[in-house]
């Protein structure tokens, strides 16, 4: 879409980490002409998004963390159909992994977004979210950027303790990774970090190796904290990391994986990277989508339509 964006809507999560720290009149300032909502429930958010669409809002600013991003993305298809608005993300959460990927730092404020949106030819970055759906029709699909199970669930649960320590953003990611690595390296074979998750999985219709998994993750993001590249070189594809349980030669595999490098022995020891359009998983254990725990089941993960994000 060429030309300046004409109608801006803000979805603000007042409970997100940064927004809870902001107090006073500046925190409550709402620019004239901007549609502003602070929904308390997913149902309220869905109604707000339908109203945004009806009113012609063509830029939705998400002021919150990764969970707020996930909830807004999940509400857009019903509200906007096949013509989603442009988006902008303010890094107001605890980890803000999408904002990091987009290069949206603390200086990327609402004022900066509005200035960029008013330009004759605003710059955009395109990102493709994952659509995570369950075979149970009663469970609505969820849209996000990181799907994972196994050790990733345990690491995410650990993050709650790390955040209570006062560590956020890239520091929290570093502490979580370090804790997970130490627990896995020095735990016994039956330690919770090394235990696998029973599942069956298919990638683009091809059955993956049978057996328990230490870790299975998928993402479409290009940039992760500290330049880590566990999925390999950055691409627009859905990238999948698949690790058998218990993990073998983990001390040697970690630096190779995290630097995005490859080696023949990785595959022989149960570390596999793939790119795909469609992943299906059947498991009883929980899964994670953008920091939130969801129940397992018959799950399909696929690339959604590309979305445009206003570029810092």
Image (spheres, rainbow, N blue to C red):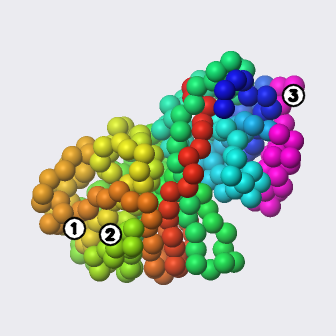
Mark 3 and mark 2 in contact? Answer it, CB < 8 Å. Answer: no
Mark toward the viewer: 3 or 2: 3
159 vs 199, left or right, is: right
Query: Of residues 16 and 31, which is closer to you in this image?
Result: 31
Q: Residue at x 56, y 60 (%)?
A: 131
Q: Is residue 62 visible?
A: yes
Residue 213 shows which numbered tag?
none
Query: Residue 287 magenta-drawn?
Result: no
Give me the C-alpha separation between circle 3 and circle 2: 50 Å
Per the image, label 2 sits on a secondary structure element best described as strand
Magenta stretch: give its range.
28-56
Give me the C-alpha separation between circle 1 and circle 3: 55 Å
Q: Earlier in the sequence, mark 1 or mark 3?
A: 3
Query: Of residues 288 and 162, which is closer to you in this image?
Result: 288
Q: Residue at x 32, y 64 (%)?
A: 242
> Around disc 2, counting alpha carbons within 10 Å, would you say few (fewer than 14), some (14 to 19), or many (20 or more)?
many
Give residue 193's quadrant in the image. Answer: bottom left
Q: Measuring from the top left, give residue 12's x and y in whole percent.
A: 74, 42
Query: Of residues 273 and 14, which is closer to you in this image?
Result: 273
Mark 1 and mark 3 in contact? Answer it, CB < 8 Å. Answer: no
Which residue does the numbered mark 2 point to in the structure image?
Answer: 214
Residue 33 shows which numbered tag?
3
Q: Measuring from the top left, give residue 96's x and y in whole percent.
A: 54, 42
Mark 1 and mark 2 in contact? Answer it, CB < 8 Å. Answer: yes
Which residue does the numbered mark 1 point to in the structure image?
Answer: 270
Give me the C-alpha separation between circle 1 and circle 2: 10 Å
For this orientation, the residue located farthest to the left is 265
Q: Earlier in the sequence, mark 3 or mark 2?
A: 3
């Amino acid at each position: 879409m060429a030309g300046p964006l004409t109608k801006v809507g803000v979805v603000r999560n007042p409970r997100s980490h940064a927004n809870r720290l902001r107090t006073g009149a500046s925190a409550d300032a709402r620019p004239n002409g901007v549609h502003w909502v602070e929904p308390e429930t997913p149902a309220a958010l869905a109604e707000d998004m339908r109203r945004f669409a009806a009113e012609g809002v063509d830029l939705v600013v998400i002021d919150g963390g990764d969970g707020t991003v996930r909830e807004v993305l999940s509400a857009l298809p019903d509200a906007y159909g096949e013509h989603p608005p442009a988006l902008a993300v303010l890094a107001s959460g605890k980890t803000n992994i999408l904002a990091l990927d987009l290069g949206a730092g603390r200086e990327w404020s609402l004022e900066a977004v509005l200035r960029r949106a008013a330009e004759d030819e605003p710059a955009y970055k395109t990102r493709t979210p994952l659509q995570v759906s369950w075979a149970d029709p009663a469970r609505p699909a969820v849209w996000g950027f990181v799907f994972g199970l196994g050790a990733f669930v345990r690491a995410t649960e650990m993050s709650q303790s790390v955040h209570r320590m006062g560590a956020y953003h890239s520091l929290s990611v570093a502490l979580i990774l370090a804790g997970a690595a130490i627990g896995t390296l020095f735990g016994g074979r039956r330690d919770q970090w090394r235990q696998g998750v029973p599942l069956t999985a298919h990638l683009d219709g091809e059955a993956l190796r049978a057996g328990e998994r230490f870790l299975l993750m998928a993402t479409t993001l290009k940039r992760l904290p500290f330049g880590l590249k566990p999925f390999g070189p950055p691409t627009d594809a859905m990238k999948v990391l698949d690790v058998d349980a218990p993990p073998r030669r983990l001390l040697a595999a970690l630096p190779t994986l995290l630097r995005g490098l490859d080696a023949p022995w990785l595959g022989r020891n149960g570390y596999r990277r793939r790119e795909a359009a469609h992943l299906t998983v059947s498991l009883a254990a929980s899964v994670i989508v953008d920091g939130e725990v969801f129940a397992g089941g018959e799950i399909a993960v696929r690339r959604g339509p590309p979305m445009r994000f206003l570029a810092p």
